[in-house]
Amino acid sequence: MTVPVRSLQFADAREAADLAAFLGRLLHYDRAAAVRLQAGGSALAVFGRPPSFEVLAIRTARLSGTHDFDTTVSAGELLEALDPDEAAGPGALPQPVTGPPWTGVLPPRGGWQERPGLPGPESLRTALTGAVAEFRARDAALPEDRRTRAERDLIGRDIWSRTVGDTELPLRAVHAAQSLGFLRPSPGFPVALLAAGSWLRLRTPFGSIALRGAGGGLGTLAVTVGTA
């Protein structure tokens, strides 16, 4: 894809710093991570897929000026382009890369409706703590001849596929939100569960985690600052 824009200028240094933190967390799970960038007007949406969680992570940022592009780039190269000393200044947009399959399957543009039954952030954190403790206990209980990656993966799938509260949201989505810095377990912290077709979306002020079930449709997420 040919990208007409060769640089990004953020609305302020905080926007670039927050995006850099998100990219750093993605790269922790996949040093070769790619991200899809969609810009419309003064808003930028960044999509990534941390492989450990099998979800899409979405972070938005405000840009200075008007932009209109859709491209996939290396997360590492984009992070390097964000100068911490001049974070609000122009940053080079990396050259496009051939994106992995997930970059062609993004959440739908509209039709999101809030779903009830999601526990509060403190309860979600408690569930995560319990899940991690259970994983460690079950792993420790494995006999030596079964202490393999395959056995650990089976335990992980059992634990992280469980749903939270009275929802269909798997615990792995909450784990991803916590690990990527989207979830803050403090009183009054706003979290919401949205649904559109077969897609589910855990939304917080710092970003969203989205995933879909079998039969989900294709589409693109609206680029709107403040809705991620």
Image: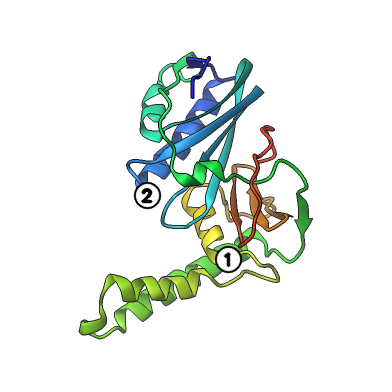
Q: Residue 126: where, in percent of width, then height?
A: 55, 68
Residue 109 left/right relative to 146? right
- Please report whichever mark, 1 or 2, sits nearer to the chain's N-terminal start: 2
Residue in the picture at 78% in, 52% down: 113
| Above-or-below relation of 135 to 17 | below
Residue in the picture at 45% in, 17% down: 91
Q: Label for residue 29?
A: 2
Image quarter of residue 42: top right
Looking at the rendered structure, the kind of residue marked 1 is Pro
The residue at which mark 1 appears reads as 170
Looking at the rendered structure, the kind of residue marked 2 is Tyr
User: Are there few (<14), some (14-19), or many (20+) residues within 10 Å of tag 1?
Assistant: some
Q: Tell me whether circle 1 and circle 2 mark residues in contact (CB < 8 Å).
A: no
Q: Label for residue 95?
A: none
Q: Quadrant of the C terminus?
A: top right
Q: Residue 17: where, in percent of width, then height?
A: 48, 29
Residue in the picture at 50% in, 26% down: 16
| Above-or-below relation of 111 to 86 | below
Tell me the element at label 1: loop
Q: Residue 86: where, in percent of width, then height?
A: 44, 16
| Above-or-below relation of 27 to 37 | below
Residue 95 left/right relative to 183? left
| Above-or-below relation of 116 to 147 | above
Q: Residue 4: where, in percent of width, then height?
A: 53, 14
User: Are there few (<14), some (14-19), or many (20+) residues within 10 Å of tag 2?
Assistant: some
Image quarter of residue 14: top right
CA–CA distance between discs 1 and 2?
19 Å
Nearer the observer, 224 or 24: 224
Tell me the element at label 2: helix
Nearer the observer, 103 or 152: 103
